Amino acid sequence: MKFTTTLSALLTLAAASQSAVATGEFQNLQLRQGGDANALLQGLRDNNLTSLANVLSQHPAVTERILADNSEKTLLAPNDDAIAMLPSWVTSNSSRLEATLLQHVLRGNFETDKLNAYPLHTIGHSLLNNSDFSKLPGGAGQAVALAKSGNRTFVAEAVNNDTFVQQSVKVDTVTVLPISQAITVPGSVTDTLRFLGYTGISTLLANVQNGALANTIDSLPGVTMFVPTNDAITKFTATNPNPTDIPTVLGQHVVAARVVYSPLLIDQGSLISASGQDIVFDNNAGTVKVGNFTAKILQTDIIAQQGVIHQIDNVLASTALDTGRAAQAQKSAEASVDAEKAQSISGPVSGKNAITTQGTDVPAAQQGSGANNRSANDNTDNAGSGQTESAIGNGTNGNNGGASQAGNSNGSNGNGNGSGNQNGNGVDHRNPNAASASTANTALAASAVLAASILALVL
Ligand SMILES: *[C@@H]1O[C@H](CO)[C@@H](O)[C@H](O)[C@H]1NC(C)=O
Ligand SMILES: *[C@@H]1O[C@H](CO)[C@@H](O)[C@H](O)[C@H]1NC(C)=O
Ligand SMILES: *[C@@H]1O[C@H](CO)[C@@H](O)[C@H](O)[C@H]1NC(C)=O
Ligand SMILES: *[C@@H]1O[C@H](CO)[C@@H](O)[C@H](O)[C@H]1NC(C)=O
Ligand SMILES: *[C@@H]1O[C@H](CO)[C@@H](O)[C@H](O)[C@H]1NC(C)=O
Ligand SMILES: *[C@@H]1O[C@H](CO)[C@@H](O)[C@H](O)[C@H]1NC(C)=O
Ligand SMILES: *[C@@H]1O[C@H](CO)[C@@H](O)[C@H](O)[C@H]1NC(C)=O
Ligand SMILES: *[C@@H]1O[C@H](CO)[C@@H](O)[C@H](O)[C@H]1NC(C)=O
Ligand SMILES: *[C@@H]1O[C@H](CO)[C@@H](O)[C@H](O)[C@H]1NC(C)=O
Ligand SMILES: *[C@@H]1O[C@H](CO)[C@@H](O)[C@H](O)[C@H]1NC(C)=O
């Protein structure tokens, strides 16, 4: 079995970066480092990507980024229908539109016939590194998940598969892969959970000190979150857990300062939770385990502004808390980030080019946790080729179908406007107005070590 997949969730919270330059300058724009903007636009037009060419011609800053430094890029090119379907809250806002365009440009080359098979994904980093829109470690560009399934290849978003609709064409250093629907810029972790209808965990998070834990998660410098289904949360709460244990239990589901996409998870073995426990990943079973609690991974690589979400079928209900261990793991991971490297990751993400690793000062495995002792750098590289064997997301298990997730979301995200399938066409565009309802709670110290926050909430 091979798998690992993703879905992207998106929202937007972008603050206004300055938007485009005057359109008229474009005709003669000869890009500094050599790329020829007019040749790129003509190449797009020659391939029926006229609308995209027109949009880019009005946003030369984006074209310049695409052609900058002469490095290989992959342009996931929305076709004319896809451009026509862009919602007005994207097209009417220059900074959001530019962010959306930049998210469609990946560094490096991605050959569609070599993509990981759904539900496993191949992950790329885009040019969207504006910190209003992407809050990944080191300022890395926001991630995009690609996959193939049978004879289809697509960008996998949480509520959408954006199908590759034509053969790729090469224009200068840019490989153009036309897609049927545009990608949406992802929102924060907690907005993404709400958007996708993860009401169970959203409610638990919102209830912890008026959203303080939720806000802390959204302020982490990178995050991997294992999110139980609503059914799993319902079963857990039916056991009447001690309320003071809830922050600790939630903390078992969070890995602070690490962004472990599924191909990296397969390489990784184990992680350390924000409550300081080993999260042990079993690639053959497709499970994660903390203490005596095991959960199957149902869906991987739901992209969020600060990192990645994987859906699981059970609550990792361990109440064991070791804040010192968690803090050390977080610091070690934070220290592993090399901004220059993070911003230049090219091609499929693997152990060799990941934005974060566990670092060199990681606590040893806990006795009896089942985790292997960690080496200083356990990032190997076996997941980029599409040949990875993993039980993650086996069969159709747990892929609830994005459409139903989106449909469930509108009651819980603030004002219900513009969320979900805005134009009835499965398009994964989220209205930023629908997402902002959650942000006003008391925040714990913004870049806090999460473990300290959890401890504060427990006490
Ligand atoms: C454009 O979108 C950004 C990001 O969501 C937002 O911060 C900004 O206020 C918007 N600008 C306008 C004029 O609506
Ligand atoms: C562009 O569209 C036209 C009309 O639909 C079609 O005949 C032509 O083959 C298309 N060209 C490419 C490169 O797809
Ligand atoms: C984004 O990346 C470009 C290089 O591609 C860099 O010049 C720019 O400073 C980065 N922006 C941010 C906000 O990090
Ligand atoms: C792709 O596979 C499906 C089902 O296996 C088949 O019906 C369809 O004709 C195939 N399409 C192409 C273009 O091969
Ligand atoms: C994306 O495609 C996969 C593979 O065919 C399918 O299982 C999944 O349900 C699709 N996702 C969405 C959101 O349509
Ligand atoms: C995955 O599916 C195969 C075939 O249906 C099955 O034999 C295997 O046990 C499944 N693995 C998991 C972890 O569910
Ligand atoms: C795990 O389960 C074993 C056996 O059921 C029990 O002895 C042990 O105390 C449990 N560990 C924890 C941390 O709950
Ligand atoms: C892991 O390594 C540490 C330090 O090197 C050592 O003290 C500990 O016994 C090892 N644990 C296991 C389970 O091998
Ligand atoms: C979401 O909105 C749609 C369209 O307005 C509506 O049909 C659907 O019932 C709503 N879903 C929920 C869970 O409220
Ligand atoms: C949703 O937003 C649009 C414009 O963004 C506005 O015209 C419409 O009235 C809003 N609908 C609701 C129900 O708030």
Image (cartoon, grey):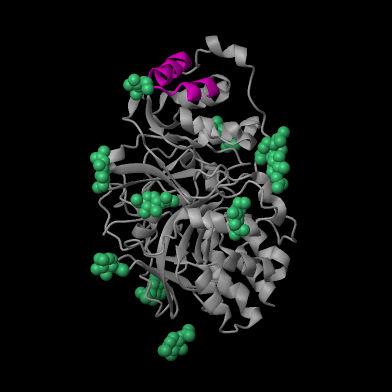
Residue 255 visible within the image: yes
Asked whether residue 173 is drawn in magenta, I would say: no
Q: Quadrant of ligand 7?
A: bottom left
**Is 342 left or right of 189, judged from the image as shown?**
left
**Which quadrant of the figure contains the C terminus?**
bottom right
Decide which of 48, 239 is in the foreground and name it: 48
**Is 107 left or right of 54, judged from the image as shown?**
left
The spot of residue 226 in percent (x, y) is 49, 64
Quarter-of-image position of residue 457 = bottom right
Q: Is residue 413 above or below residue 128?
A: below
**Which quadrant of the figure contains the N terminus?**
bottom left
**Is 423 left or right of 48, judged from the image as shown?**
right
The structure residue drawn at horizontal position 57% and vertical position 35%, both measured from the top left corner, is 99
Magenta portion: prevailing SS class: helix
Marker count (numbered): 0
Asked whether residue 43 is drawn in magenta, I would say: yes
The structure residue drawn at horizontal position 56% and vertical position 48%, both measured from the top left corner, is 305
Q: Is residue 188 above or below residue 391?
A: above
Q: Is residue 119 above or below residue 77?
A: below
The spot of residue 288 in percent (x, y) is 41, 69
The spot of residue 408 in percent (x, y) is 57, 59
The spot of residue 278 in percent (x, y) is 45, 71
Quarter-of-image position of residue 247 = bottom right
Magenta segment, which residues? Answer: 34-55
The structure residue drawn at horizontal position 28% and vertical position 48%, both measured from the top left corner, is 386
Quarter-of-image position of residue 233 = bottom right
